[in-house]
Structure formats: C-alpha cells, structure tokens
Image (cartoon, rainbow, N blue to C red):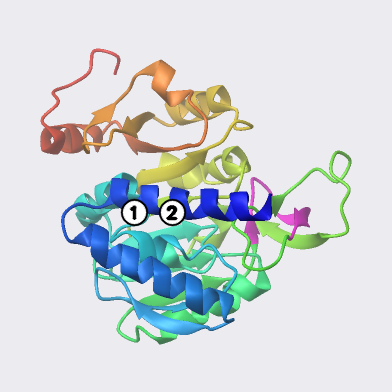
C-alpha cells in the first residue's frame, strides 16, 4: 500500500509538471523537482532563485514544491496580478505563510506588507526578505479578522498552509492556541498609498474583507484576490463588496475574466474583485467590453 501511494504521488508530480510547463521547461522542472525531493528528504534547507530573480529560503517538509515544479505558482492568478501591478505600489499579503507568492512579485511592487500569525512562517518571511535587501517589507505577526482582540487559531505546524482561525466550540484539537487579531482598516490606517491585496486565510476570508470596510469605501484597494473555499459564504462576500461598489470576477486559464455567477460559486478557486471605477481599465486591457451586469 505504501509503495502504491508513493507511485501515485510520483505520477501526480510528473503530471503536474507536464501540464504546467511546455517545451524544455518540462524537463528542466522535472530535474528541479527530483533534486528538491531528494534534498527535502535529506532534511536540507537552502536558498533557491525564482523565475523573477527573487531569492527564497526553502525548508524540508513544507509546501514549497510549487517553486520547483513551474516558473509561476498559482500561475494564471499570479500572472494576472503581475499584469496589473501598476494599479498600486504596495502589495499586501494576508496569510503570507513563508512568502512564496509575494516573492514571485518582488520585481513588480516597491513595497510589501506581509501578515502572518504563525511564528515559524513569520521567521521564514523575514529570512526571505533579508535575502532580497532591495525590497521594502513590513512584517505583521498577527491574524486578521473583522474585529480587534483574540481568536482561537489551529496551528498545524511545519509551515502548514491550512492553519487557520477556528470556532473552538466546533473544533477541539491540542494544536489550538490563542492569537491576537486585528482588522485591515486598523493595520493599514497609516498607509496613504493605494494597495493590491491578497487574502488566503483558509475560510476566514469573509471576516478579513469585512474588516477592510474603510479601505474599500475609500477605494484604496485597487485589486483584491481571495481564496474561495467550500466553507466560504460567497453570497455574503458578494453582498458586502457590492455595498462598497466593488465587483467580483474569476480569471480564466487564458488570462481573461468572467463574471459568471456559476463560476464564482465553484469551491477551491481564487477570485478577484475591483472597484467599478477600476473595472473599465481592466476590461480595456482584457478587451472584453463592458458586461451588462454592472
């Protein structure tokens, strides 16, 4: 059984590399993946260089595999942000983990705000930014919600990408601890510049978005990317963003966008939002015209 699981895992990796790459990149990243798997199993931590030239400190037994499987992790969504990075000078990464996503944008923004409650991930964030001294990074070791105070946090350790705020009455595990929480409105209140914001907090996205009410009202968030999980109440988010004059859309594999309601309700995807004032600029770039729905 263990051998079968290993073979399935290997075949899945090869399939991912073959699907996400083309031409010689398929062989280049297959080699990178093999080296990474060997070094990971040997317990090595080391520095690698991403496609945009950014340096990244990687550790064994973490979710760094994407950095060795293709040039761009979460490719279509990352490339969409790269294409529209001129909308704002600062990138805010809520749930930054170890900074892989942000590091893939180090050549596109002048400033970064990296927000991460897990201590080991927070240390890794600092190490990665130290390897890229030309990048201006602000680090915030806190969780984000729609209120100030404390919350129960499921810390799964080992740089987990699924650690999250939980309802302690519904989830009872020894890994749960208390963390400080704050709103984006409060954390970013001193910033005068416009922002592009990514939110990846494993189901707590609605609360994070609600806690940025003032930023949305002021139109300071030019582009928002957030994860849509099965437990995400997309109707609540749609209603909130409509109330602050923002619209939600999905980026297709070819980089174009859709406002299709069925697509927006699919789980395990990333969604985007922008203000109605910014939308014509994005539509012009995508050459899609203006949807009747807005």
| Mark 2, other Cα within 10 Å: few <14 / some 14–19 / many ≥20 | some
Report how far apart the C-alphas of labels 2 and 1 lie in the structure: 6 Å
In terms of secondary structure, what is the magenta stretch mainly?
Answer: strand
Residue wearing tag 2: 13
Q: Is residue 267 magenta?
A: no
State which region is magenta: 143-155
**Residue 155 spot, x, y in % from top left:** 74, 60
**Residue 104 spot, x, y in % from top left:** 33, 65
Residue wearing tag 1: 17
Q: In this orientation, which residue lies closer to the viewer: 220 or 294?
A: 294
As displayed, is residue 180 above or below residue 59?
above
- The residue under the point 35% across, 70% down is 32
Q: In this orientation, which residue lies closer to the viewer: 93 or 33?
A: 33
- The residue under the point 85% across, 46% down is 168
**Residue 220 spot, x, y in % from top left:** 36, 49
Mark 2 and 1 residues: CB-CB less than 8 Å, in contact?
A: yes
As displayed, is residue 232 above or below residue 15?
above
Quadrant location, the C terminus: top left
- SS type, badge 2: helix
Relative to 260, 8 lies left or right: right
- Which image quarter: residue 103? bottom left
Count of number-bearing discs: 2
Q: Is residue 220 visible?
A: no
Q: In this orientation, which residue lies closer to the viewer: 9 or 66?
A: 9
- The residue under the point 41% across, 83% down is 47
- SS type, badge 1: helix
């Amino acid at each position: 059984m263990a051998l079968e699981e290993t073979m399935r895992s290997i075949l899945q990796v090869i399939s991912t590399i073959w699907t996400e790459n083309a031409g010689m990149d398929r062989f280049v990243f297959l080699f990178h993946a093999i080296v990474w798997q060997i070094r990971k199993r040997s317990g090595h931590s080391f520095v690698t260089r991403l496609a945009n030239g950014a340096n990244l400190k990687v550790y064994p037994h973490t979710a760094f595999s994407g950095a060795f499987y293709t040039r761009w992790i979460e490719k279509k969504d990352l490339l969409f942000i790269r294409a529209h990075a001129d909308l704002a000078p600062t990138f805010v990464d809520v749930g930054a983990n170890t900074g892989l996503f942000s590091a893939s944008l180090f050549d596109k923004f002048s400033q970064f705000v990296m927000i991460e409650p897990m201590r080991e991930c927070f240390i890794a964030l600092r190490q990665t930014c130290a390897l890229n001294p030309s990048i201006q990074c602000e680090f915030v070791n806190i969780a984000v919600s729609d209120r100030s105070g404390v919350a129960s946090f499921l810390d799964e350790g080992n740089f987990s990408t699924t650690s999250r705020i939980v309802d302690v009455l519904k989830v009872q595990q020894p890994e749960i601890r208390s963390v400080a929480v704050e709103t984006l409105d409060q954390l970013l209140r001193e910033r005068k510049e416009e922002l592009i914001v990514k939110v990846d907090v494993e189901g707590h996205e609605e609360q994070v978005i609600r806690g940025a009410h003032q930023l949305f009202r002021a139109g300071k968030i030019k582009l928002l990317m957030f994860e849509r999980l099965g437990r995400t109440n997309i109707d609540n988010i749609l209603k909130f963003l409509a109330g602050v004059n923002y619209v939600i859309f999905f980026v297709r594999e070819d980089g174009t966008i859709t406002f299709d309601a069925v697509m927006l309700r699919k789980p395990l995807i990333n969604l985007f939002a922008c203000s109605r004032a910014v939308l014509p600029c994005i539509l012009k770039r995508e050459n899609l015209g203006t949807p009747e729905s807005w």
